[in-house]
Amino acid sequence: MAEKDKPLLIKRYASRRLYNTETSDYVTLEDIAGFIREGREVQIIDLKSGDDLTRQYLLQIIAEHESRGENVLPVDVLNDLVRSYMVPGGGIMPQFLQSSFDMLRDSQSQMTETMTAMNPMAQIPGFEALKAQQETFLKAMSGAMGGGWPGAAREEEKPAASGGEGLDDIKKQLAELQDKLSKLK
């Protein structure tokens, strides 16, 4: 079995520090969340007792993200989860949740494959190189126009685009660029 196929073993010391056994360094909860986002399974074991603490730490990661306003779980779902603890044996909730997430993962995977197959441009040899060349050209053009368009931040100063406002900004900048090009003629 390849290293990446088996769970990443994290050991918790008596000091509550978490130790990554693969890289021989200490990690934080955010590091562990990053491993999981990258598709890696983790297993967290108490060094002294040998108890599996994975569930406890995963719940802690979820609680921290929820408390920071990164709400993924609607209140109704949280209420249903609490109610499921009142049913002897947990009822059918664990199997339902597992099946739901399995279906979600399968759907996302199929959608990604479909989108890749449906994009005819992605199938053209050299498409990625052409795309990179186009981006370089646009950056060079904005630099040649005196560092960009009026009111626009330079590349290193640009804030990250948020929501749909990025498209409107691009349209405005494109119109300004066309105007400048027509004046150059």
Image: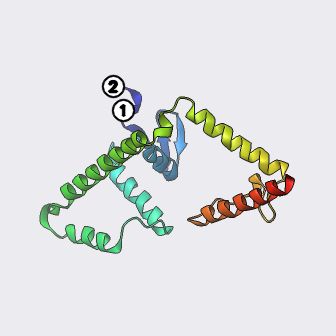
User: Which sits in the foreground, 144 or 9?
Assistant: 144
Can you identify the residue that label 1 sits on? 5
Q: Is residue 30 left or right of residue 137?
A: left
Query: Label 2: few (<14), some or many (≥20) within 10 Å?
Result: few
Name of the residue lying farthest toward the front: 185
Q: Which mark is residue 111?
A: none
Q: Amino acid at mark 2?
A: Met
Q: Is residue 11 above or below residue 65?
A: above
Report which residue position mark 2 lands on.
Answer: 1
Q: Circle 1 sits in a helix, a strand or a loop, which is it?
A: helix
Image coordinates of residue 169 in percent, x first then y, are 67, 63
Q: Is residue 109 visible?
A: yes
Residue at image x 85%, y 57%? 183
SS class, disc 2 = loop
Q: How is the image coloured?
A: rainbow
* Amino acid at dot 1: Asp
Where does the image place residue 21, in percent across and percent down from the top left?
46, 35
Percent across and percent down for residue 109 are: 35, 44
Residue 95 locus on image (x, y percent): 19, 55
Task: Identify the residue at image location x=37%, y=37%.
Answer: 7
Q: Is residue 22 left or right of residue 166?
A: left
- Are dots 2 and 1 in contact, CB under 8 Å? yes
The residue sitting at 54% across, 42% down in the picture is 26
Decide: few, some or many residues near mark 1? Use Cα within 10 Å; few <14, some 14-19, many ≥20. Answer: few
Residue 43 visible in the current orientation: no
